[in-house]
Image (spheres, rainbow, N blue to C red):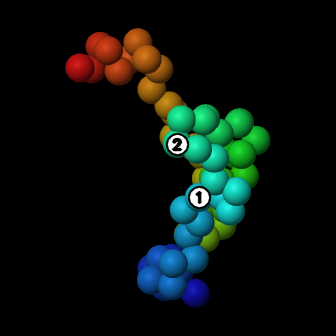
């Protein structure tokens, strides 16, 4: 199955089954699990995660 077919079949996990309230952050373990599931769904296992911008970097960019 190609990555596009997976997208069309909505195989990409959007959020965990036990979604938290919008104002509650995910733990690092939850983020890691979600990233692994995303990578597996699009056929790129062990892909490097993008870096998150810090609050300082956001302020500078604005």
Q: Is residue 22 above or below residue 13?
A: above
Residue 60 image position (x, y, % from top left): 29, 13
Q: Quadrant of the N terminus?
A: bottom right
Query: Which of the two marks, 2 or 1, is nearer to us in this view?
Result: 2
Residue at point 60% right, 35% down? 24
Residue 38 placement, left or right of 56: right
Furthest-front residue in this view: 21
Tell me the residue at 58%/44% (across/down).
21
Q: Quadrant of the rendered structure where residue 26 is?
A: top right
Residue 57 percent coordinates (x, y):
38, 17
Q: Which residue is mark 1?
A: 15
* Element type where label 2 sits in the image: loop
Outermost residue toward the left in this view: 62
Residue 36 appears in the rendering:
no
Residue at horizontal 61%, vertical 70%?
41
Q: Which mark is residue 52?
A: none
Q: Residue at x 61, y 35 (%)?
A: 25
Q: Secondary structure at mark 1?
A: loop
Classify mark 2: residues with Cα within 10 Å, few (<14), some (14-19) or many (20+). Answer: few
Above or below residue 50? Residue 15 is below
* Quadrant where the C terminus is found in the figure: top left
Q: CA distance from mark 2 to mark 1?
A: 12 Å
* Label 2 sits on residue: 22
**Residue 4 against residue 18 in the figure, above or below:** below
Q: Counting other residues with Cα less than 10 Å from the Cα at mark 1, is it few (<14), some (14-19), or many (20 or more)? A: few
Q: Nearer the viewer, residue 59 or 39?
A: 59
């Amino acid at each position: 199955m190609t990555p596009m077919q997976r997208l069309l079949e909505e195989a990409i996990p959007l959020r965990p089954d036990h979604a938290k309230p919008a104002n509650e952050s995910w733990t690092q373990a939850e983020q890691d699990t979600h990233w692994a599931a995303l990578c597996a769904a699009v056929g790129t296992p062990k892909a490097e995660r993008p870096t998150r911008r810090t609050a300082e970097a956001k302020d500078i960019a604005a």
